[in-house]
Amino acid sequence: MQVVDSAIGVIQRRSLRRNASPVETGILPLSRIHRAVALIDVEDTSFDLCKNRLIAFFREHNIHGEIFFLDFRKLGEGERLITSINGTILRKDLNWYGRPSDEKMRLLNEGDPELLISAVREKNFAYEFMVMASHAKFKIGRKQLPGNVFDVILSEKEDHILSEADAFAGMARLMEKMR
């Protein structure tokens, strides 16, 4: 089993290198941001509040924003999806080694967003792939990924983990200072 995991790891690293966005990133003031995408994890108990805060932020700053929900849970009998199917990346949208489908990646990069906001705390290959392959010119998140993908990180103390909604509130305050 360890050999299989190792081989998948090699394939994942190769896929990340091959699909990494060629767009150079850096900090942009809010006045230069017109399109944005956000990633949130539905397993965080505050994801709905985070979604509402993102929508309000986009509206307040006249940004056309799209929210993508990461939902890799196994839904049980009778459970239903609670987010939009187009804006949700499900386990079935991943290929055998965890790469999101071309359709979901096309939706993520549609309209060439200037900003990518990630309120996701726990990383996995699909999430890492989406962030690295995003063509956004400014990326803000909670935990740095290999290769220093994020331009700004909202750090948190190990003994005080923020919810997604609180993490985004902190990111919003930071971005509003970057006028």
Image (cartoon, rainbow, N blue to C red):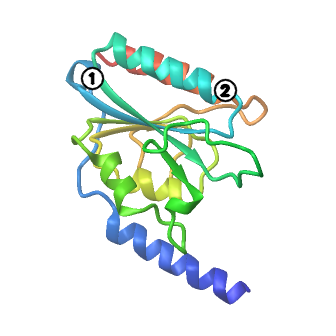
Residue 46: numbered disc: 2
Image x and y of residue 22, in percent: 24, 58
Give the residue pinned by disc 1: 29
Residue furthest toward the front?
A: 78
Q: Residue at x 22, y 40 (%)?
A: 111
Q: Amino acid at mark 1?
A: Pro
Residue 141: numbered disc: none
Seen from the viewer's position, the closer of residues 26 and 168 is 168
Q: Amino acid at mark 2?
A: Ser
The C terminus - image quarter: top left
Residue 136 appears in the rendering: yes
Q: Residue at x 61, y 36 (%)?
A: 82
Image x and y of residue 89, in percent: 51, 50
Q: Residue at x 65, y 80 (%)?
A: 5
Seen from the viewer's position, the closer of residues 47 and 170 is 47
Label 1 secondary element: loop
Residue 147 appears in the rendering: no
Image x and y of residue 121, in percent: 62, 41
Image x and y of residue 125, in percent: 55, 61
Question: Is 120 situated above or below 94?
Answer: above
